């Protein structure tokens, strides 16, 4: 008798930060766990970088990628709506197209996985009687806050940001009010209610797959499994640790401009500066950052985008768009730093850069994908959080894991001055603090590699997920 190959559908919401982990996780399920996977990628026509991600994954016969154009929401949502609201409405309005695509599959898939923004797609799983799971592309600490949000909504009086004491999460590290996720910073905005409603829907899934690993967040993962309040928030459903999900560095022999430049630099001498696929900073902050880098005297590679004073996630839905001439730096900056700095517009091969022997530090927005790529490359960081749960990630990196430094005041609250930039860069690249962090990073990197190796904690957890799926569809 031939065992049936389990067919899993993964639905990814718009944005490279959501799509890339879905592609990587789907590929892992196919290559390491012998599954058939179809990824339904809800994409926007404003992000050229999204389509470029598909190419490396198209050669596997058991991994299919179907782009689904996101529904036009211009008549449903205000143009200045927060990114969370826009993505959630986009996913809701695209449900009919997703349903049509799934219903045309013969045979139908066995299991449906959606990210947190695709909670509305659970109705499709119910309709076709498929087990449904939620894929959390962030970490466990963020997941704990997210799942506990409905309780906090009833428990906390007034604005969260006005609370004096840290926000308590049962069994987990508390969170300072100013470091909460963006939608919780203003309860009067529409995105706050979207956040709360979403957190209720997500916990109705049959289980959670989280992009973390046991050795990285033991306290929070223990709370999910043994704290009665947290267990009840998750409806006593299983939590599977499947991380780190990241692109593994595989030298190809082909070298672009950035790698060729890095080849000429001394070991551990280059600071890589990038605010991810969606992050933007103001013109004033670009000026101060440029001066700080120049004053530090350190080598650097900087992925630059045009300034945006009013929106720190201004490139989230249009990553990869050409930015035009780079003319927003202090006068003479490009000339004065041409021997030690390389400017790259919009996009750079981040995994290749972080794994290059000449790179010794990473100034990052602390998106979870970038954080994982830095950890798995063994590169310490300057934490520069901008939006979403990045403030929480920065706190984890600086206070708990102690592999990053950060500005004294959140960059979203105050422009970080050139003197402070210079100080952080020097500390990371040539100071004693940087050496200590580099050693800590080595241990984290080894733990990450062990988690996804054969019989590692995340490998075993993913095997358990597959077993649970098979047991549900065999009922």
Image (cartoon, grey):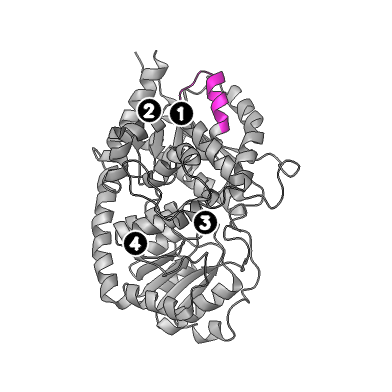
Mark 4 neighbour class, 10 Å CA radius: few under 14, some 14 to 19, many 20 or more: some
Determine contact: label 2, label 1, CB under 8 Å. Answer: yes
Badge 2 is on which residue? Answer: 237
Residue tagged 3: 387
Distance from the alpha carbon under mark 3 to that under mark 2: 29 Å
Magenta range is 120-132
Question: Which residue is depicted at the point 44% across and 76% down?
Answer: 421
Q: Quadrant of the N terminus?
A: top left
Quadrant location of the C terminus in the rendered image? top left
Q: Residue furthest right?
A: 75
Which residue is label 1 attached to? 205
Tag 2: Cα neighbours inside 10 Å, few (<14), some, or many (≥20)?
A: some
Q: Residues within 10 Å of mark 1 (few under 14, many from 20)?
A: many
Q: CA distance from mark 2 to mark 1?
A: 8 Å
Question: Which of marks 3 and 4 precedes in the sequence?
Answer: 3
Please report whichever mark, 2 or 1, sits nearer to the chain's N-terminal start.
1
Q: Earlier in the sequence, mark 3 or mark 2?
A: 2
Residue 128 lies within the magenta run: yes
Query: In the picture provided, is 95 more to the left or to the right than 239?
Result: right
Mark before the other along the chain sequence, 4 or 2: 2
Residue topped by disc 4: 398
């Amino acid at each position: 008798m031939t065992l049936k190959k389990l067919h899993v559908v993964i639905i990814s919401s718009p944005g490279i930060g959501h799509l890339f982990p879905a592609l990587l996780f789907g590929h892992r399920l196919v290559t390491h766990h012998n599954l058939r996977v179809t990824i339904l990628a809800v994409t926007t026509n404003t992000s050229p970088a999204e389509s470029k991600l598909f190419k490396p994954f198209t050669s596997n016969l058991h991994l299919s990628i179907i782009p689904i154009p996101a529904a036009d929401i211009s008549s449903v949502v205000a143009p200045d709506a927060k990114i969370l609201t826009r993505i959630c409405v986009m996913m809701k309005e695209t449900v009919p197209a997703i349903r049509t695509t799934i219903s045309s599959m013969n045979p139908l898939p066995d299991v449906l996985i959606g990210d947190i923004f695709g909670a509305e797609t659970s109705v499709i799983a119910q309709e076709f009687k498929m087990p449904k799971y939620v894929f959390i592309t962030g970490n466990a600490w963020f997941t704990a806050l997210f799942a506990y949000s409905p309780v906090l909504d009833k428990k906390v009086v007034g604005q969260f940001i006005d609370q004096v004491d840290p926000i308590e999460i049962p069994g987990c590290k508390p969170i300072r009010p100013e470091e909460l996720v963006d939608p919780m910073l203003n309860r009067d905005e529409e995105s706050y209610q979207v956040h709360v409603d979403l957190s209720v829907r997500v916990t109705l899934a049959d289980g959670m797959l989280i992009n973390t690993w046991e050795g990285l967040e033991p306290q929070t993962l223990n709370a999910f499994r043994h704290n009665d309040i947290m267990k009840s928030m998750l409806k006593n459903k299983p939590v599977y640790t499947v991380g780190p999900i990241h692109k593994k560095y595989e030298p190809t022999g082909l070298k672009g401009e950035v790698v060729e430049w890095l080849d000429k630099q001394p070991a551990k001498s280059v600071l890589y500066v990038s605010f991810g696929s969606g992050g933007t900073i103001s013109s004033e902050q670009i000026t101060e950052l440029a001066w700080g880098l120049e004053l530090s005297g350190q080598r650097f590679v900087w992925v630059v985008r045009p300034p945006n004073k009013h929106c720190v996630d201004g490139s989230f839905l249009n990553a990869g768009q050409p930015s035009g001439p780079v003319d927003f730096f202090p006068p003479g900056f490009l000339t004065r730093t041409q021997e030690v700095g390389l400017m790259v517009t919009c996009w750079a091969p981040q995994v290749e850069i972080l794994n290059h022997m000449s790179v010794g530090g990473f100034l990052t927005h602390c998106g979870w994908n970038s954080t994982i790529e830095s950890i798995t490359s063994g590169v310490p960081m300057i934490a520069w959080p901008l939006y979403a749960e990045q403030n929480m990630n920065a706190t984890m990196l600086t206070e708990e894991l102690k592999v990053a430094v950060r500005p004294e005041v959140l960059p979203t609250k105050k422009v970080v001055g050139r003197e402070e930039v210079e100080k952080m860069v020097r500390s990371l690249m040539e100071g004693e603090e940087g050496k200590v962090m580099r050693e800590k990073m080595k241990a984290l990197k080894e733990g990450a590699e062990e988690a996804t190796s054969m019989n590692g904690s995340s490998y075993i957890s993913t095997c358990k997920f597959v077993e649970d799926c098979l047991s549900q569809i065999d009922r």
